[in-house]
Image (cartoon, rainbow, N blue to C red):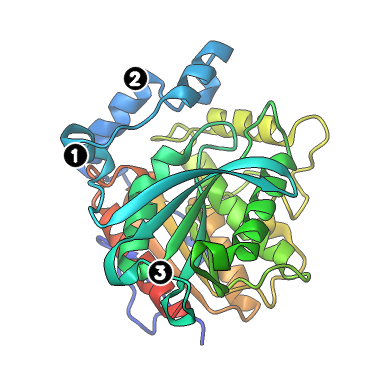
Protein backbone atom coordinates (compact mmCIF):
# COMPACT_ATOMS: atom_id res chain seq x y z
CA UNK A 1 0.00 0.00 0.00
CA UNK A 2 1.18 3.56 -0.59
CA UNK A 3 2.93 4.98 2.44
CA UNK A 4 1.93 7.96 4.57
CA UNK A 5 3.10 11.53 4.53
CA UNK A 6 5.39 12.26 7.46
CA UNK A 7 6.43 15.60 8.89
CA UNK A 8 9.46 16.61 10.89
CA UNK A 9 9.72 19.30 13.55
CA UNK A 10 6.36 20.81 14.53
CA UNK A 11 4.26 19.12 11.86
CA UNK A 12 4.01 15.35 12.24
CA UNK A 13 1.37 13.22 10.61
CA UNK A 14 0.03 10.12 12.29
CA UNK A 15 0.76 6.88 10.43
CA UNK A 16 -2.76 6.79 9.02
CA UNK A 17 -3.02 10.50 8.29
CA UNK A 18 -4.30 11.54 4.83
CA UNK A 19 -1.75 12.81 2.35
CA UNK A 20 -0.90 16.48 2.37
CA UNK A 21 -2.30 18.74 -0.31
CA UNK A 22 -0.45 21.36 -2.28
CA UNK A 23 -3.30 23.75 -1.57
CA UNK A 24 -2.30 23.66 2.11
CA UNK A 25 0.88 25.47 1.10
CA UNK A 26 3.85 26.21 3.32
CA UNK A 27 3.43 26.96 7.02
CA UNK A 28 1.56 30.19 7.69
CA UNK A 29 3.08 33.12 9.54
CA UNK A 30 6.75 34.11 9.88
CA UNK A 31 9.42 31.88 8.40
CA UNK A 32 10.71 29.73 11.26
CA UNK A 33 14.01 28.01 10.58
CA UNK A 34 16.77 26.98 12.96
CA UNK A 35 19.16 29.71 14.04
CA UNK A 36 22.18 27.93 12.57
CA UNK A 37 20.38 27.47 9.27
CA UNK A 38 19.29 31.12 9.29
CA UNK A 39 22.90 32.30 9.81
CA UNK A 40 24.20 29.94 7.13
CA UNK A 41 21.63 31.07 4.57
CA UNK A 42 22.40 34.73 5.35
CA UNK A 43 26.13 34.16 4.80
CA UNK A 44 25.47 32.20 1.62
CA UNK A 45 23.25 34.98 0.31
CA UNK A 46 25.81 37.68 1.13
CA UNK A 47 28.51 35.70 -0.65
CA UNK A 48 26.27 35.04 -3.66
CA UNK A 49 27.64 31.51 -3.64
CA UNK A 50 24.68 29.98 -5.46
CA UNK A 51 22.73 33.07 -6.56
CA UNK A 52 23.06 32.51 -10.30
CA UNK A 53 20.87 35.53 -11.07
CA UNK A 54 23.68 37.72 -9.68
CA UNK A 55 26.56 35.87 -11.35
CA UNK A 56 28.69 36.97 -14.25
CA UNK A 57 30.18 34.36 -16.57
CA UNK A 58 33.39 34.49 -14.52
CA UNK A 59 31.42 34.07 -11.29
CA UNK A 60 29.70 31.01 -12.74
CA UNK A 61 33.03 29.48 -13.74
CA UNK A 62 34.45 30.07 -10.25
CA UNK A 63 31.36 28.60 -8.59
CA UNK A 64 31.65 25.48 -10.70
CA UNK A 65 35.34 25.20 -9.90
CA UNK A 66 34.89 25.11 -6.12
CA UNK A 67 35.82 21.77 -4.61
CA UNK A 68 35.10 20.51 -1.13
CA UNK A 69 37.90 19.06 0.97
CA UNK A 70 36.77 16.88 3.86
CA UNK A 71 38.30 17.92 7.17
CA UNK A 72 37.33 18.82 10.73
CA UNK A 73 36.35 22.37 9.74
CA UNK A 74 34.26 21.62 6.67
CA UNK A 75 32.54 18.69 8.37
CA UNK A 76 30.92 21.14 10.81
CA UNK A 77 28.88 22.46 7.89
CA UNK A 78 28.85 19.78 5.21
CA UNK A 79 28.87 16.78 7.53
CA UNK A 80 31.49 14.20 8.53
CA UNK A 81 32.30 11.41 6.12
CA UNK A 82 32.01 7.79 7.28
CA UNK A 83 35.38 6.07 7.62
CA UNK A 84 34.19 2.76 6.20
CA UNK A 85 33.49 3.89 2.63
CA UNK A 86 35.90 4.26 -0.30
CA UNK A 87 35.46 6.86 -3.04
CA UNK A 88 36.69 6.25 -6.59
CA UNK A 89 36.31 8.55 -9.60
CA UNK A 90 36.01 6.84 -12.98
CA UNK A 91 35.93 8.18 -16.52
CA UNK A 92 33.47 5.99 -18.38
CA UNK A 93 32.26 5.58 -21.95
CA UNK A 94 28.49 5.72 -22.40
CA UNK A 95 25.96 5.99 -25.19
CA UNK A 96 25.91 9.77 -24.54
CA UNK A 97 29.70 10.09 -24.63
CA UNK A 98 32.38 10.11 -21.91
CA UNK A 99 31.25 10.89 -18.36
CA UNK A 100 32.80 11.00 -14.92
CA UNK A 101 31.16 9.05 -12.11
CA UNK A 102 32.12 8.68 -8.46
CA UNK A 103 31.71 5.28 -6.84
CA UNK A 104 31.03 4.94 -3.12
CA UNK A 105 31.67 1.43 -1.83
CA UNK A 106 31.33 0.26 1.78
CA UNK A 107 34.20 -1.61 3.40
CA UNK A 108 34.12 -4.88 5.31
CA UNK A 109 31.28 -7.41 5.02
CA UNK A 110 29.28 -4.98 2.88
CA UNK A 111 32.08 -4.38 0.37
CA UNK A 112 30.51 -6.49 -2.35
CA UNK A 113 32.12 -9.13 -4.48
CA UNK A 114 31.67 -11.33 -7.49
CA UNK A 115 29.66 -14.07 -5.80
CA UNK A 116 25.95 -13.52 -6.25
CA UNK A 117 25.35 -13.36 -2.51
CA UNK A 118 28.04 -10.68 -2.10
CA UNK A 119 26.89 -8.26 -4.78
CA UNK A 120 25.60 -4.86 -3.72
CA UNK A 121 22.42 -3.07 -4.76
CA UNK A 122 23.11 -0.02 -6.92
CA UNK A 123 21.96 3.53 -6.23
CA UNK A 124 22.51 6.06 -9.04
CA UNK A 125 22.67 9.63 -7.72
CA UNK A 126 22.33 13.05 -9.38
CA UNK A 127 23.49 16.21 -7.61
CA UNK A 128 21.51 19.45 -7.49
CA UNK A 129 22.44 22.89 -8.75
CA UNK A 130 19.65 23.96 -11.08
CA UNK A 131 21.26 22.21 -14.02
CA UNK A 132 23.87 24.99 -14.21
CA UNK A 133 25.80 24.57 -10.95
CA UNK A 134 26.91 21.77 -8.67
CA UNK A 135 29.42 18.94 -8.77
CA UNK A 136 30.08 15.52 -7.32
CA UNK A 137 31.57 16.87 -4.08
CA UNK A 138 28.31 18.34 -2.81
CA UNK A 139 26.72 14.88 -2.67
CA UNK A 140 29.62 13.19 -0.86
CA UNK A 141 28.00 13.18 2.59
CA UNK A 142 24.69 11.80 1.34
CA UNK A 143 26.14 9.21 -1.00
CA UNK A 144 28.82 7.96 1.39
CA UNK A 145 26.36 7.49 4.24
CA UNK A 146 23.85 5.73 1.98
CA UNK A 147 26.62 3.37 0.85
CA UNK A 148 27.65 2.66 4.44
CA UNK A 149 24.20 2.30 6.00
CA UNK A 150 22.31 0.59 3.19
CA UNK A 151 25.23 -1.54 2.05
CA UNK A 152 24.97 -0.23 -1.50
CA UNK A 153 27.22 0.72 -4.36
CA UNK A 154 26.39 4.36 -5.03
CA UNK A 155 27.19 5.76 -8.46
CA UNK A 156 27.09 9.57 -8.54
CA UNK A 157 26.97 11.14 -11.99
CA UNK A 158 28.81 14.27 -13.16
CA UNK A 159 26.36 15.19 -15.92
CA UNK A 160 26.82 18.07 -18.35
CA UNK A 161 25.63 21.50 -17.25
CA UNK A 162 23.75 24.33 -18.96
CA UNK A 163 23.84 26.82 -20.58
CA UNK A 164 26.74 25.26 -22.50
CA UNK A 165 24.82 21.99 -22.68
CA UNK A 166 21.06 22.66 -22.57
CA UNK A 167 18.27 20.08 -22.51
CA UNK A 168 18.36 17.20 -23.26
CA UNK A 169 22.10 16.88 -22.43
CA UNK A 170 21.72 16.28 -18.68
CA UNK A 171 18.80 13.91 -19.22
CA UNK A 172 20.71 11.94 -21.82
CA UNK A 173 23.80 11.77 -19.59
CA UNK A 174 21.69 10.56 -16.69
CA UNK A 175 19.99 7.83 -18.66
CA UNK A 176 23.28 6.75 -20.23
CA UNK A 177 24.92 6.55 -16.80
CA UNK A 178 22.02 4.50 -15.45
CA UNK A 179 22.31 2.07 -18.37
CA UNK A 180 26.10 1.90 -17.90
CA UNK A 181 25.76 1.03 -14.21
CA UNK A 182 23.28 -1.73 -14.94
CA UNK A 183 25.29 -3.05 -17.89
CA UNK A 184 28.51 -3.17 -15.84
CA UNK A 185 26.93 -4.32 -12.58
CA UNK A 186 28.80 -7.63 -12.54
CA UNK A 187 32.20 -6.00 -13.04
CA UNK A 188 31.39 -3.44 -10.34
CA UNK A 189 30.27 -6.05 -7.83
CA UNK A 190 26.72 -4.74 -8.04
CA UNK A 191 23.30 -6.23 -8.67
CA UNK A 192 21.55 -5.30 -11.89
CA UNK A 193 18.27 -6.50 -10.38
CA UNK A 194 18.41 -4.13 -7.41
CA UNK A 195 18.63 -0.54 -8.68
CA UNK A 196 17.45 2.80 -7.33
CA UNK A 197 17.78 6.39 -8.51
CA UNK A 198 18.23 9.36 -6.18
CA UNK A 199 18.66 13.10 -6.62
CA UNK A 200 18.14 16.47 -5.00
CA UNK A 201 16.64 19.57 -6.63
CA UNK A 202 17.63 19.48 -10.33
CA UNK A 203 19.06 16.04 -9.64
CA UNK A 204 15.65 15.02 -8.33
CA UNK A 205 14.21 16.15 -11.65
CA UNK A 206 16.62 13.86 -13.48
CA UNK A 207 15.84 10.92 -11.19
CA UNK A 208 12.09 11.37 -11.73
CA UNK A 209 12.50 11.76 -15.49
CA UNK A 210 14.66 8.63 -15.73
CA UNK A 211 11.88 6.64 -14.11
CA UNK A 212 9.51 7.84 -16.84
CA UNK A 213 12.04 6.96 -19.55
CA UNK A 214 12.97 3.58 -18.10
CA UNK A 215 9.31 2.57 -17.83
CA UNK A 216 9.28 2.24 -21.62
CA UNK A 217 11.59 -0.76 -21.89
CA UNK A 218 14.61 0.62 -20.03
CA UNK A 219 16.46 -0.69 -16.99
CA UNK A 220 14.24 -1.88 -14.14
CA UNK A 221 14.27 0.63 -11.27
CA UNK A 222 13.18 -0.54 -7.83
CA UNK A 223 12.98 2.82 -6.04
CA UNK A 224 13.20 6.56 -6.59
CA UNK A 225 14.30 9.01 -3.91
CA UNK A 226 13.47 12.63 -4.76
CA UNK A 227 14.70 15.40 -2.47
CA UNK A 228 12.91 18.74 -2.95
CA UNK A 229 12.75 17.94 -6.68
CA UNK A 230 12.12 20.28 -9.59
CA UNK A 231 9.06 18.69 -11.18
CA UNK A 232 7.33 21.58 -12.98
CA UNK A 233 9.29 24.25 -14.81
CA UNK A 234 6.16 26.38 -15.05
CA UNK A 235 6.91 27.64 -11.51
CA UNK A 236 3.26 28.53 -10.85
CA UNK A 237 2.73 26.94 -7.42
CA UNK A 238 1.82 29.21 -4.46
CA UNK A 239 5.07 28.45 -2.61
CA UNK A 240 7.02 29.91 -5.53
CA UNK A 241 5.49 33.28 -4.72
CA UNK A 242 5.58 32.86 -0.95
CA UNK A 243 9.34 32.22 -0.99
CA UNK A 244 10.25 34.15 -4.11
CA UNK A 245 13.02 35.91 -2.18
CA UNK A 246 14.40 32.75 -0.64
CA UNK A 247 16.12 31.82 1.56
CA UNK A 248 18.70 29.86 -0.45
CA UNK A 249 16.71 29.75 -3.69
CA UNK A 250 14.94 32.78 -5.18
CA UNK A 251 12.50 33.14 -8.05
CA UNK A 252 15.10 35.18 -9.95
CA UNK A 253 17.55 32.30 -9.66
CA UNK A 254 14.90 29.81 -10.74
CA UNK A 255 14.17 31.83 -13.88
CA UNK A 256 17.85 31.84 -14.86
CA UNK A 257 18.23 28.13 -14.14
CA UNK A 258 15.17 27.40 -16.29
CA UNK A 259 16.34 29.55 -19.19
CA UNK A 260 19.78 27.94 -19.10
CA UNK A 261 18.42 24.42 -18.88
CA UNK A 262 15.81 24.72 -21.63
CA UNK A 263 18.00 26.68 -24.03
CA UNK A 264 16.50 28.00 -27.24
CA UNK A 265 14.51 24.89 -28.13
CA UNK A 266 13.36 23.46 -24.79
CA UNK A 267 9.72 23.36 -23.73
CA UNK A 268 8.81 23.71 -20.05
CA UNK A 269 5.64 21.68 -20.66
CA UNK A 270 7.60 18.66 -21.93
CA UNK A 271 7.03 15.88 -19.35
CA UNK A 272 10.70 14.94 -19.64
CA UNK A 273 11.47 18.47 -18.39
CA UNK A 274 8.50 18.73 -16.02
CA UNK A 275 7.59 15.21 -14.84
CA UNK A 276 4.60 16.51 -12.88
CA UNK A 277 2.98 17.16 -16.27
CA UNK A 278 3.34 13.58 -17.52
CA UNK A 279 -0.07 12.29 -18.65
CA UNK A 280 0.38 8.96 -16.89
CA UNK A 281 2.30 8.18 -13.68
CA UNK A 282 1.22 4.57 -13.37
CA UNK A 283 3.75 1.74 -13.04
CA UNK A 284 6.56 3.98 -11.83
CA UNK A 285 8.93 2.79 -9.09
CA UNK A 286 8.03 3.19 -5.41
CA UNK A 287 8.95 6.69 -4.32
CA UNK A 288 10.20 8.61 -1.33
CA UNK A 289 9.57 12.33 -1.89
CA UNK A 290 11.20 14.70 0.59
CA UNK A 291 10.20 18.35 0.66
CA UNK A 292 11.37 21.42 2.58
CA UNK A 293 8.70 23.63 4.13
CA UNK A 294 10.61 26.86 3.45
CA UNK A 295 11.26 26.36 -0.24
CA UNK A 296 9.81 27.78 -3.47
CA UNK A 297 9.61 24.19 -4.77
CA UNK A 298 7.63 22.94 -1.77
CA UNK A 299 4.15 22.77 -3.30
CA UNK A 300 5.29 21.14 -6.54
CA UNK A 301 7.02 18.41 -4.54
CA UNK A 302 3.84 17.82 -2.52
CA UNK A 303 1.81 17.71 -5.73
CA UNK A 304 4.16 15.16 -7.28
CA UNK A 305 3.89 12.87 -4.27
CA UNK A 306 0.10 13.10 -4.54
CA UNK A 307 0.17 12.46 -8.28
CA UNK A 308 2.25 9.32 -7.79
CA UNK A 309 0.02 8.10 -4.98
CA UNK A 310 -3.13 8.75 -7.02
CA UNK A 311 -1.61 6.67 -9.83
CA UNK A 312 -1.18 3.72 -7.48
CA UNK A 313 2.56 4.13 -6.96
CA UNK A 314 3.67 3.24 -3.40
CA UNK A 315 4.72 6.67 -2.20
CA UNK A 316 6.05 8.05 1.04
CA UNK A 317 6.17 11.83 1.45
CA UNK A 318 8.20 13.48 4.19
CA UNK A 319 7.81 17.23 4.65
CA UNK A 320 10.46 18.95 6.79
CA UNK A 321 8.64 22.04 7.99
CA UNK A 322 11.62 24.13 9.13
CA UNK A 323 14.05 23.15 6.37
CA UNK A 324 15.17 25.25 3.42
CA UNK A 325 15.95 24.29 -0.14
CA UNK A 326 19.18 22.32 -0.46
CA UNK A 327 19.27 21.28 3.20
CA UNK A 328 20.68 17.79 2.54
CA UNK A 329 23.94 19.44 1.42
CA UNK A 330 24.67 21.13 4.77
CA UNK A 331 23.81 18.63 7.51
CA UNK A 332 26.04 20.39 10.02
CA UNK A 333 23.72 23.38 10.19
CA UNK A 334 20.32 21.87 9.37
CA UNK A 335 19.09 19.11 11.65
CA UNK A 336 16.53 18.00 9.04
CA UNK A 337 19.38 16.55 6.97
CA UNK A 338 20.05 13.82 9.51
CA UNK A 339 16.35 13.03 9.76
CA UNK A 340 16.08 12.86 5.96
CA UNK A 341 19.12 10.58 5.77
CA UNK A 342 17.41 8.17 8.18
CA UNK A 343 14.32 8.18 5.96
CA UNK A 344 16.35 7.64 2.80
CA UNK A 345 18.33 4.74 4.24
CA UNK A 346 15.19 3.10 5.64
CA UNK A 347 13.44 3.40 2.27
CA UNK A 348 16.36 2.08 0.25
CA UNK A 349 17.06 -0.75 2.69
CA UNK A 350 13.46 -1.86 2.33
CA UNK A 351 13.12 -1.47 -1.43
CA UNK A 352 16.52 -2.97 -2.29
CA UNK A 353 16.44 -5.85 0.21
Q: Position of residue 34 (x, y in %)?
A: 22, 44
Residue 295 appears anywhere in the view: no
Split into 4 quadrants, where in the image is the C terminus? bottom left
Q: CA distance from mark 3 to mark 1?
A: 31 Å
Could you tell which of marks 2 and 1 lies nearer the N-terminus? 2
Q: CA distance from mark 2 to mark 1?
A: 20 Å
Q: Between label 2 and label 3, give the one nearer the viewer.
A: 3
> Disc 3 on helix, strand or loop?
loop
Indicate left or right for 291 with 10 as reference: right
- Most extreme residue toward the left, as rendered? 72
Residue that label 2 marks: 46
> Disc 2 on helix, strand or loop?
helix
Which disc is residue 341 wearing?
none
State whether residue 109 is above or below residue 332.
Answer: below
Residue that label 3 marks: 112
Q: Position of residue 200 (x, y in %)?
A: 48, 50
| Tag 3 and tag 1, C-beta contact below 8 Å | no
- Most extreme residue toward the right, as rendered? 265
- Most extreme residue toward the front, as rendered? 114
Q: Residues within 10 Å of mark 1 (few under 14, many from 20)?
A: few
> Disc 1 on helix, strand or loop?
helix
| Residue drawn at the location 62% of the way across and 41% of the way down | 99
Amino acid sequence: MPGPTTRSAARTAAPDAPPTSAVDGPPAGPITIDVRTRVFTWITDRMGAIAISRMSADDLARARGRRLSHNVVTSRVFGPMPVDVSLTDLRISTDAGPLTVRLYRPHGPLAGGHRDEDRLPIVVNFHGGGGSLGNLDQSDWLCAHVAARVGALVVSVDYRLAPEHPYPAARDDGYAALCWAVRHADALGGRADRVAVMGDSAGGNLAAVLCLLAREGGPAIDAQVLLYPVVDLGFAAPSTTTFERGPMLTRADMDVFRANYLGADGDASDPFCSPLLAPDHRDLPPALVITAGVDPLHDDGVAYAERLRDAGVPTRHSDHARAVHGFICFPGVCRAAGEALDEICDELSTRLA
